[in-house]
Image (cartoon, rainbow, N blue to C red):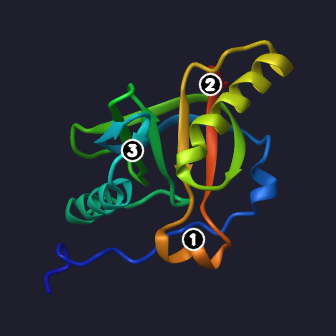
Amino acid sequence: MHHRDATPPCRCPALSYDEWEGRRVMFTQKPFLTRRVPRAFGVSIGVEEEIGALRRLALALDLPLGEPPMVLERVRGFFRGELLLALGTDTGPENIARLDGAYLAAVHRGPHETLGAARARFVAAIGGERGVTPREIFYWYTDCPRCRDARGGPVTIILARIGASEA
C-alpha cells in the first residue's frame, strides 16, 4: 500500500484536561491547514472522515504536523464549518490559515451534539466575568473514535478568542 493511501496513526494528544479549564492560550501566526465541512442544524456532518482526509492531505503534501496535535473546527455559519489542522511549518499550500490572538479555554466532556449549549454557557461566562464577547470560537477535538471510549467519552476543548496577540 502506498503511504498516501494509509490511514495516519492516532495522534490524540495526552492532555491534562483539568489544566486546560480556564487556560489562556496565545497564538502568534500559528499555521493551520484548512478544509471546509458541511453542517446541518448546527452540527458538523462526517467530521471524523473529514479529519482523516485533512490528515491524509498533510501527509501527501509532506507537511509536518504541529505539537500538540490539534484539530480545530471553526463554525462558519449554520450550514458550513471549517476544520483546521495545526502544522509545524510556515510554508505550504494556499489553504493555510494563521491564527493570532489570545484565547480562553473551557473543557467540554460529552457528546458533540451538546457543544452548542456548552458554547453558549462559556460565552455567557466570559461576558459576565470579563465583560467581553469572544470574536471567534473554535472546537478542539482532542480524541479520535479509537481513544474516545478508552478515555471515558468525547472531550472537546472550546477556545474563545478574547483579545489580540501580545507579540
Q: Can residue 36 be seen in this view?
A: yes
Q: What label sits on residue 44 in the rendered view?
A: 3
Q: Where is residue 17 in the image (x, y as percent from the top left)?
A: 75, 58
**Label 2 is placed on what type of residue?**
Ser
Q: Kindly identify the amino acid type of the residue bearing the numbered disc 3.
A: Ser
Work out how far the residue at label 1 is from the one at label 3, CA to CA, in angstroms. 18 Å
Q: Earlier in the sequence, mark 2 or mark 1?
A: 1
Image quadrant where residue 31 sits: top left
Secondary structure type for disc 3: strand
- The answer to whether mark 2 and mark 3 are in CB contact below 8 A is no
Residue at position x 37%, y 53% in the image? 47
Q: Which mark is residue 148?
A: 1
Per the image, label 2 sits on a secondary structure element best described as loop
Q: Label 1 is placed on what type of residue?
A: Arg
Q: Name the element at disc 1.
A: helix
Q: Residues within 10 Å of mark 1 (few under 14, many from 20)?
A: some
Q: Name the residue under label 2.
A: 165
